[in-house]
Image: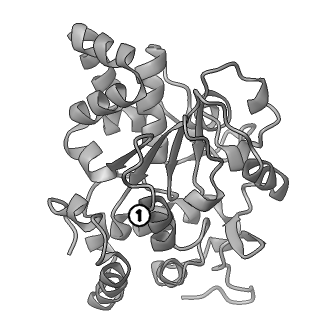
Amino acid sequence: MEKLGAERRNKLSLHNVDGFLFTDKCSVKNFRQALSFKPRANDIIIAGYPKSGTTWLQYIIWEIISRKKTFPNVNEMRWKEVPQLEMAGTEEIEKIESSRLLKVNLPFNLTPYHPSVKYIYVIRNPWDCCISGFNYYKQIDECFSDGTFEDYFGYFIKGETTHGDYFEHLLSWYSRWKDPNVLFLTYEEMKRDIRNVVLKIAAFVGNEYQQALNKDNELLEDILCRLHFRYMKENCPFYLSTDSGTKINFFHTGRIGQWKEYFTDDHNAILKNKFIEKLKNTEIIRMWQNSDIP
């Protein structure tokens, strides 16, 4: 039931810069800085559509390279350890010594590019990605506090959520599918076989990291233990802002197939039709052959 005597708060808070939509949690200034950023040849950049698993991927790569025992919270990870270009801006990032771990949620055509930079792009099936976005923005976007899943689904299908249309974002990166400096992963394979994913990433980012994990099984097992979803949910808090004590349920459930608790038959049919229309001529669909999607 809608609230009486007050305007219903079911609109996502978004900036629109030259037709590109992104959350107002990112400033326009920092967004523009990200677009003109010049990466260094030995940077590693994590990429993906929002709520596809990029934060989890940040922790995975940070663990492989740093081998530290204590996890930073999500705010520290996002702003300091593996800063997100369009959120953090680039002024402080320029001061970080090489090699840098960075993150973007930008489509490829807006992502700062260098042929020697290693890019790791994670994709998540759009059904669960949609649910994850809904649960997240219900918590952090005051203007969407009354929003229903029906509201969010409408925005998602029309590409009117942060960082634009899910499928256009995915297809922009698919154009680099065969590039040797781009590694594609799926959230679903991360959930099914995190050990294999960690070893795959280590091999991609550098022989020294692959060799370290191959030689030290105790190190590998220690990393895998901390990367378990339940461990991260309990030990990696996320606060509404860097100076806020308000915790957000960032790591919600992480389950594959949670969409079944929200989608009606009509929702499913609409998304499935768009999924087939957009991806029918790509190799992407086979990446989800063993996943719990229609």
Q: In the rendered image of this protein, does residue 50 appear above or below residue 236?
A: below
In the displayed structure, does residue 195 sit left or right of residue 26? left
Residue 222 vs 133, above or below: the answer is above
Q: Picture coordinates of residue 125 (x, y %)? A: 33, 64
In which quadrant is the C terminus drawn?
Answer: bottom left
- What residue sits 51% from the left and 66% below the top? 169
Task: Residue 75 in the image: state x and y as whole percent.
Answer: 63, 37
Against 123, is 100 above or below?
Answer: above
Query: Which residue sits at x=62%, y=52%?
Result: 111
Amino acid at circle 1: Cys
Q: Mark 1 points at which residue?
A: 129
Q: Say whether residue 64 is left or right of residue 144.
A: left
Label 1 SS: helix
Give the side of residue 274 with respect to residue 135, left or right. left
Picture quadrant of residue 24: bottom right
Give the residue at x 56% y 65%.
Answer: 138
x, y percentage for residue 130?
A: 43, 69
* Front residue of this view, candidates 138 and 257: 257
Q: Can residue 251 be seen in this view?
A: no
